[in-house]
Each structure stands twice: as structure tokens, then as C-alpha cells.
Amino acid sequence: MDFFQVQTTQQVKEILRGFTPLGIEDVALQDALCRILAEDVVAPDALPPFDRSAMDGYALRAKDTFGAAEGSPALLEVWGEVKMGERPSIEVRDGGVVQISTGGMLPEEANAVVMVEHTQVIDERTIQVFRAVAPGENVIQRGEDLKREEKILERGHRLRPQDLGALAALGKGMVRVHRRPRVGIISSGDEVVPIDAVPHEGQIRDTNRYTLWALTLEAGGKPFHLGIAKDELKDLQGKLDEGLFQGDVLAISGGSSVGTRDLTIEAISSLAQAEVLLHGVAVSPGKPTILAKVGEKVIWGLPGHPVSAMVIFMTLVAPSLWRLGGRTDWDKPYSWSLKATTSRNIPSAQGKEDYVRVKLSENEGELMAAPIFGKSGSISTMVKGDGLIRIEMDSEGIEEGEEVEVWPF
Amino acid sequence: MDFFQVQTTQQVKEILRGFTPLGIEDVALQDALCRILAEDVVAPDALPPFDRSAMDGYALRAKDTFGAAEGSPALLEVWGEVKMGERPSIEVRDGGVVQISTGGMLPEEANAVVMVEHTQVIDERTIQVFRAVAPGENVIQRGEDLKREEKILERGHRLRPQDLGALAALGKGMVRVHRRPRVGIISSGDEVVPIDAVPHEGQIRDTNRYTLWALTLEAGGKPFHLGIAKDELKDLQGKLDEGLFQGDVLAISGGSSVGTRDLTIEAISSLAQAEVLLHGVAVSPGKPTILAKVGEKVIWGLPGHPVSAMVIFMTLVAPSLWRLGGRTDWDKPYSWSLKATTSRNIPSAQGKEDYVRVKLSENEGELMAAPIFGKSGSISTMVKGDGLIRIEMDSEGIEEGEEVEVWPF
């Protein structure tokens, strides 16, 4: 596979664009948070479906209050009360008002509500109104929130709390969403042992299993574990077979040895229908990354160093999960970026995108980003960090005091 | 309860400071994402526990490469290979090297690794080295990631993917975390019907149940439903009793009528041990907010309007859940804020904190925030929005072109 050129992240995203979103399923509304809509949502009816009062007070005809003021109140007759949750049985005619609570349905002919604070009860049948109201004042008009047939949400959108609220208001108890990608996680390397084992000398515990598991969850995927593969072709092939049977995506990290890296590409290539799409990215840390397809299924070969594996996951694997998960904005970064000022020089080699961990702090209202240097095997550098900055391929680095974009994690 | 003064968010946070974090429980590491640590984590051993190679190449004594260059390679003897996951059986003595893969344990006496790219195999026992390496080069020193007894994570920290990775590296298969607050959700009002009902005229579907459910999940709580309470004291009291039995926190929203609002405070006050801590906040939308305690349990009375209920949840209820959940940074905003430029004037009345929904867009690299106006009953204004801006109490508004802080949602 040496004929593969190292690709830029932009080129990798072009590859991901060719992936087909997974199928759809229907889920109950209360389980739909963070799910990706698989249909446009259009309001079947106007929302609200009737004129509602936005305040506690009296429904009336606005013109009956014209000229009313502190010194010259309007005297109006109370004809009754609007019961919550019912169509008012009383009409409002000239000179008459009907008591109403917030959310109550406006009676026919009423076109405004005067707030209770601007009235005074004279007797059971009479109130004084101290303020003129305009037509429509303190009323939520039928269709003011959503017009009938108005599109409120689009296919490919990730559902937030307010989106669930809008779906509830429209009576959508079930929501059509894309299936979540099932992501099989494999750690590889003869030196890697499960975390409940006591490592002998030369062995280390399996870190990537947990970081990749958690990153998969954050990216909307459903992780499952395939265990630790030994540096043997057969072991790796067995885990790949099992993973492809169960999952949509596999993420194999490390072993960090050359031997294993060759083994990963060898094991992938040995699968029927396997197509290696990428072998090496112009990203640091994370260069020795592999991307392959087996039919519609996707295999990522990630570096073994924990920081490298995380950076590649955040910049490339997560977008691939979003793409498969049906998100329209799958090629956007995984969070809004913050603007910060660098607190020291950060050197970088040209010819690759460099991702640097930074610690954020505030200095007189200004956000400062201090680079955290350290090897890509050092998980503690990610723990101490608040986010990543990217140094572009053609840059030789960033100088102290320059403004940078930070993607918080 | 009229003697209560409307409180500022700062005053409310002082009340929340008095709350006691919930108890602790042990969870498996892979279930610990987003959980709040209930203990400091200290490295029991150095990480890595031995000197490891950071590269594929040859372990050696640095001094044996001094003076080596393209034109004058050093000739060194290969004594064998380090097996991954094992303690090397070979010592490196003067003039000797041992082949090693990334992550392999350095043999005794070796103090550096030369990358394979800078060597040439002459025969089975001999290589040429074309570059001098310094002592420690391409080696991850024992304890370089974490020193023995170094504190890596603090009690009260919310666990991210990299934190799980660090805990894995230290062999912590179980993690001590705070219990998640169980939050009972009640919607109230005679006009509110379940979303699977067909609303009659005057009725509306239960929106808050879903927004508050989802916001509770996002804030790390465990939501459960108590249903819709009618505007009857007995019904509300029954749901409060049930909720206090099952939950740590109750969130009652609306009914938006004056009657119901009085009913909420009446129902809360009727509970033995109830202590009303707050009745009215200087926040718009969301003024008619109630906070009460019953023993160690917390009751929030939220406005019925969906936007108001969401704003109060994000600004006050979420911090109360973080406080109960043991987070150290519970009084910080719920996300990093972004700096943006307002695209038009936003008026505001003095004497209250105003939260305005904004739509974000980019204009020549500058983030622009356009206010979304609309009544607080309009859930669509939240759906169309990307975040909230806050207008401070003493401000009369924000002018077009001013810089604002946006909390994305």
C-alpha cells in the first residue's frame, strides 16, 4: 500500500462525502435528544391553534380602552371568565370584558387583553381600566409561533431540547431519525493489557479502549468492544470479521509498533471486498491513519498513542460518524470555536496540520491559550488541556500574542 | 409569600451555594463519561512505569552516535530485539544496539532511540546510523506522563473522554462519583394535554415535559415524569408528594395562569418542612420563578411559557443540579461563551437580566449575532436560535455593532 499518498483532512472529507447515511428508525420523542432527524418536519396545524392570552387580565375589544389613562379610567362590564382549556362560551361585545388567565383562549370578537395590573375591580360586574391597549396587545395570535405547513426542522438536524419541545407542540410522539452508527473498538498490540490486569514490566494498560468508547458516545455512535488483538494476523482478522458482522464502523488503535501497523493494513487488505481509501494523513499527531471500506462498512486504523488517536478521532472519525448518522453539517468542526490569544510561541513544521493542546484562562476579559507541550503518548497533556488549536499546513507556527481559534473539548 | 423580594441570579446562586452535594456511588469506568468525580485521583505508580520507545528504531547509548552524520555514519552492532510487552532480556553495552518498536521497553543501559529512518541495515548484525541522538531522545521516560503520587484529577471534575483514558492508564476500573440528581418533572394547567391527545379548542400540548426532560439529561440529571397536574390543589399536592418520595429535585412548570401560580406556591407551602427560598427573579423571560426546599430536596416552580422555562432552567436550574451533583464549577455558565457582533439594536428594560435568543452567522470571519424577537410562548424562537445573550440588569440595551457574549445551545 506504499503507493498511497498522505492526504490532507480536506481530501479525507471528500472521501467521507461519498459515504451513504445509515437507515432510519422511529424513536419515542423522549428518547430523541441528540438524534439526527431523517425527515423534514412541517407543522400540520397552526401553533397555537387559537388566539391565546399572553397575560393574566381581561379580554376585550381594544377600542373600548382608547383614551383610558390613570386619571380617566374606562369603566367596563365583566361578563364572565374564560375557563382554562375550554372554548369560551361568552362572546365579548362592546363595553364588555371577560376575565382571562395566561394561555386562555380568547373569546370571539375580543382582540386584546389588558393586564390585571392595569385594572381595578369596582364590583362583581365592573372594572376600571387605566391604560389603553392596542389591537393584538397581550395576545398570542393563532399561528404566531408556527404557521400551518411551515417547515420547522430539517432532515439531517441534530435534535436539541427546544426541538423536542417543538415536536411535542406539534403532537409528534414518534420521530423518524437515522440509525446510530455501531462502532466496534479494537485495541491492538502485544504490550497492551486490560485495565484490571496488573501489567508486567513492558506492558501497559489499554487506554484507547476508554477514550474511543467515550468519543464514540459523544459523536452519537453506539460503541461496543472487541477486545485487545495480539500482534498476530489471525487474531486481528478474527476481530475484524466479528466487528464487521456486528458493527457499521470499526476503530482499531495501535499497537504502536511498526509490525502491528503493517499487520492492520495486512489484515484489512485480506478481507474480501476491502478497499483501502487512505493510508497516512498530513495531520500531527496522527499521521499513520488508515481508512478502508468493506462494502458499506468503514474501518479506521488509528495510531496507538492516546493523544494521536484522540486527535484523529475528533478531526476525522467523528465527522465520518456524523456523515453515516445523516447529519447535514457533518463536515463542520465538532464544536463552536473560541477566539483566544496565544501566551507563547508555538513552533510547527510545514506540510501538515498541527493540532496542539491548549489550556485556557481569562486575563482581563481576554481569553488566553497556553500550549501544552508533551509527547503524543502522554494522556495527561489532554487531561490538562481545555481544547485544541489547529496550525495550518503552510504555517511555520504561531507567535505569542497572535489570535487563534480554539475548539474546546 | 408577598414579602419575598425579587432576587438577582447572583443572589439565587448564593442560595444554591448552601445546597449539599448528593451522596456517592461507584461506577464502571466505561459508564463514567460526564459523571462528577467524588474523589481526587492520584497516580499510584509512575506512568509509564518504565522507559518506553517513542519511535520504531534502535535503542542504544546516545554517546555511541555522537559525530554520526550522512557522510560519516556510526557502525553499530545489533544484539537482538525487544519483544513488545516483555522486559528486554538483552543489555545494551558500548557499541551495541537493540531493535525496538514504538512502545517497547528500553533495555538497561540504553538511554536513547535512533529512528529506523536514520539507519541502514548492513547485515544481520550491523547497522549504520546517520544521525546523532541526544540522551533521552525518542524515549518516553518513566513517569514522564504522570509521576508517582501526582494528582491528575480533582474531586468535583466532570469526566471527559481523556479523563477516562487517564483513569484507564492508572488501572481504575471503578470510579467514585456523585449520584446523579433525580429530577421529577410536572407540567400543570387545565389547558395542558399529553402530546398523544388531540387538543380540543382552548387546549395545548405539553411542551415543557420534553424540553425540561432533555435539559435535565444535558445537565447530568436523571429525569422522570410525574404527569400533568390539573389546576387543583389536591392534584398538585399528590404529585409533589410522589415526586419528593422518588426524586431529589422537582421541576413544576406553568400552568401559566395566575391561579396555578398561586396554587404552586400554596401546594409547596402546605408540605411539612417546606421552606420557600425564592419567589420571583430579576430575569426576563422567567420572572415568576419559585425555589423551595423540603429537607434536602429541592423544588423549582418554573414559568409555563416554554422559552421562559428553558431560560430559567439553563441559567438557574442547571447550576442547582450541578451543585447537587458535586461539580466544583457549578456556578459557571453552561458552556464557553463566544464573542460575536450584534447585527441590530436590542432594547432592554433596566432592573432585570434579559436573555435574548440569537441566530449566529459568519461574515468575513466575524461571528454575527442577530436577535430573534418573539413572545416567550414561542418555542420556534428557540428552535431558530443558536444561543442566548445576556443583557445586564443596569443596561438599557445593546446597540448594533456592539460585541456580545453568546452562550451557544
Image (cartoon, coloured by chain):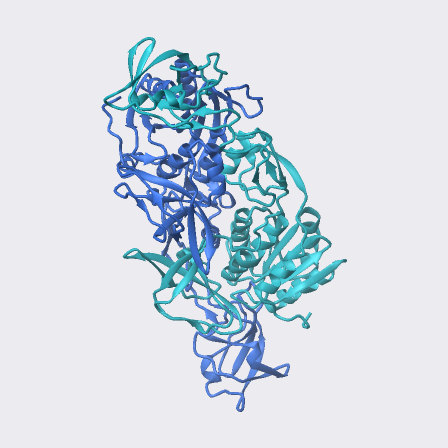
Chain colours: A cyan, B blue
Taking the image as drawn, is residue B319 in sight?
A: no
Residue B269, by quadrant, is: top left
- Between B4 and B139, the one nearer to me in the picture: B4
In the rendered image, the residue lying farthest to the bottom is: B71
- Between A145 and A230, the one nearer to me in the picture: A145
In the rendered image, the residue lying farthest to the top is: A124
Q: Position of residue A282 (x, y in %)?
A: 56, 68
- Position of the N terminus of chain A, as image quadrant, is bottom right
Q: Residue at x 76, y 58 (%)?
A: A273
Q: Is residue A404 left or right of residue A37?
A: left
Q: Is residue A156 above or below residue B6?
A: below
Q: Position of residue A373 (x, y in %)?
A: 41, 66
Residue B81, by quadrant, is: bottom right
Q: Is residue A215 above or below residue A50?
A: below
Q: Is residue A278 above or below residue B77?
A: above
In the rendered image, the residue lying farthest to the right is: A272
Q: Position of residue B23 (x, y in %)?
A: 38, 35
Taking the image as drawn, is residue A351 in sight?
A: yes
Q: Is residue B124 left or right of residue B130?
A: right
- Between A200 and B173, the one nearer to me in the picture: B173
Residue B319, by quadrant, is: top left
Q: Position of residue B260 (x, y in %)?
A: 38, 19
Q: Residue at x 39, y 57 (%)?
A: A384
How many numbered discs sit on the rendered protein?
Answer: 0
